[in-house]
Every structure is written in C-alpha cells, then in structure tokens.
Image: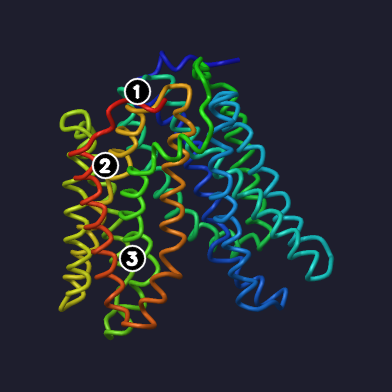
Amino acid sequence: MHVSTKSLPVGLSIVSIVCFNFASYVGNGLPLAVLPGHVLNTLGFGTTMAGLVIGLQYLTTLLSRPLAGQLADRFGAKRTVMTGLTVLTGSGLLTALAIVLPASPWVSLTLLMAGRILQGISSALISTPSCTWAIGLHGPSRTAQVMSWNGIAAYGGTAIGAPLGVLIRDHLGLAGIGIGITLLGFMPLLFAQTRRPAPLLPGMRLPFRRVFMAVLPNGLAVACSSAGFGSLTAFVALYFDSLGWENAAYCLSAFGVAFIFARLTSPNVLSRFGGYRVVTVCMAVQTLGLLLVWLAPSPLVAILGSALTGLGVSWVYPGLAVETLARTPEANRNSALSTLSLFFDLAVGLAGPVMGLVVSGFGLAQVFFCSALLSATGLLVVLCIQRHPAAKPIR
C-alpha cells in the first residue's frame, strides 16, 4: 500500500525519501572506526589488508555508479532504492556472520570483504536514486531543495555512523555492527514500500558514454571542489600535529557546521541566482578558505579557513546538479546524476594518495595550497562553461 506524498508538506515529503540515503550513510559509517582494528588485532592481518577491507566498499560504489543510474532510468528510482536497501541488509548479515561464525581468519576476512562489496553496491543503488525519486515526485523545480536535504543526510549520516559504531562495539560487541547495518537496511526497506513511486518517464535511454561526455565539464568542476574536502579530512590532523597544534577535530567540526548552516539558511539561493552563478561564488569562497588553512599562523585561523571551505563546498554539487539536469532529457536524469557523483567519488578517493605524494615531496602545508589551486581551477572551469554554454541539451 502506497501512502500519498501529496498529503505531506513538500519538505517533509522530500525528507521521507532522502531518509533512505541517511540510513545508507549511517550504515557506511558504522564499520569505519572498528573493522580495521578487528582485521589487524583479531584476524592477524597487516595494515594493507585492513585498508583494503575499508577501501573496497568505496571502490565498489565508484564502479557501480553507472549501473545504478541506468537501472533507475529503466526500472524506476523506487525499485532501485529498495534493491539497494535489500543489498544493504545482506551486507549486514555477512558482516555479522564474519564475526560470530567459528572459522579460520581467511574465511572471516572473505565474509567481511563480501559484505563490504555489497555495502558499496548498496550505496550506489540508494544515493542518487533517492534524489531522483524525490525530484520525480515533486518536479525539477525542487531539485535544489532535494539536493540540499540529501547533502545534510549524507554528511550527517557519516558524522553519526563512525562514533555510533564505536558505541555499538563497546556495548554489544563487534557482531552488533553487522546487526546494526542489517537493521539500517531492513527497517527502511519496510518504510520504502509505503512510499509512492515516481512516474517512470518515457524517452530514449542514452548510452553511458554519451551521458558521461555531456556531464564531463560539470563533473570536472565537482572533482576540483571535492578534492579540497578530501584533502582536508585526510591531512588536517597530521598538519596540526606537525605544527604542534591541538584540536584538529575542530577544523572538521567547523567545516560540517558551516556546510549545514549554508544549506539551511539559503534554501532558495539556486532558484534566485542560478546554479553556475552560485557555484562561482562558492568556489571562490572555498579557494579562500583553503588558502587560509595553508597560511594559517594559528589554529584559530586554520579553523576559520575550514569553516569557509565548508561554506564554499555547500552549494557546489547541488548547483552543478541543477545545471546538469536542465540539460539532460528526463528519461536519463538518473544516469546524469550518477555520473556527476562519479566525479565526486573519484576526487575524494584519489585525494589521499595523490596528496600523499605532495606531502612526501613538499610537506604537509602544500597539500592545502594544491587543494586551493584545484579549487581555483574548478572556478575557471565554471566561468568557461558560463561563457560557452551548451547550445542544446544532451541528445
């Protein structure tokens, strides 16, 4: 039985769909702080294997993005999200089995890795289709509002997931992590069945290659912005330590608070000024924030720079998503947004190893200078797109 979302206020209706992404990101965060220690100390494997267990999920999400978009375009966003929640449930069960089954370390590791692969697939099937499901119900004019709430769900879920995972491990044991992931898939799956599906739009389904090339300019801008976020999360603690400063965690807190503050206090900014104009201002602010972190004479200035970076990042993805959808046939919008998310995944995933090379050659501070240069490059890309806009939508 479907509950009509028309009887709900628009904002609440959007949240009732985007909440599936929140559940997914909480589930993604649960194992982050606890599985590496289990692989190292209990199973007896090295740091490389511990890193692989964590990184495998993100690699799988990256590879699954195109397929998730095509499935949602062909079969509908609701069915795709429900499939993702089912896969997330299976991931939790495999994770719990890896802990409780009396087996060899290799069997446990194999089950853990299988669970991580399923979790990566589920993330791709849930994240973008949740957005297009809400957009399909309320129309493209609500794209910015959907993206705003989706970003809050994603960052909020990640922030909650990791400490919650530690709490669950301390009180229920490591198997509780698997049970928690299972519940985060199964309970929302029951709720999803009550939500009304968005209409499946007619039209030609374009091949991924053509969608990718059309999204490429906006995707490059997303990647340039996202690399700064990835660098900040990966290296700010080491940067503070190298300078003898304390409270590096406040940088990440300042980033998150500023990000959410911008989303909540300016919900109509894209509809008033347009995606590219907002993104231009945001990337300039982000560049300034990263330069402040680089040049900071004190922890307080670095924290201020992190806050400015969060303000800048806040509307980059939604702004570029709005412009991408405006140039995409409705029948292919899932594929287009999944492709845009692909650039975000690539940038955040590559920020650690690439900036690690910068650290080895030039020092920790130069990570933030390079990130500022990338942000400025993204700003130039957006200005170039504005000067030479696409003459017509994707065909």
Residue that label 2 marks: 263
Quarter of the figure with residue 59: bottom right
Residue 200 drawn above or below residue 226: above
Residue that label 1 marks: 140
Pick the residue in front: 249 or 297: 297
Q: Secondary structure at mark 2?
A: helix
Q: Position of residue 221 (x, y in %)?
A: 31, 49
Q: In the rendered structure, find residue 96 and report the number of the disc placed on it.
A: none
For the residues bearing labels 3 and 1, Cβ distance under 8 angstroms: no
Residue at figure coordinates x 71%, y 78% from the top left? 44
Looking at the image, is mark 2 or mark 3 nearer the viewer?
3
Residue at figure coordinates x 60%, y 43% from the top left? 122
Q: Position of residue 250 (x, y in %)?
A: 29, 66
What amino acid is labelled 3 in the image?
Answer: Leu
Pick the residue in front: 168 or 58: 58
Q: CA distance from mark 2 to mark 3?
A: 20 Å
Q: CA distance from mark 2 to mark 1?
A: 18 Å
Q: CA distance from mark 3 to mark 1?
A: 33 Å
Q: Position of residue 377 (x, y in %)?
A: 25, 57
What amino acid is labelled 1 in the image?
Answer: Pro
Residue at figure coordinates x 33%, y 65% from the top left? 232
Quarter of the image where the C terminus is located: top left
Q: In the rendered structure, find residue 232 and report the number of the disc placed on it.
A: 3
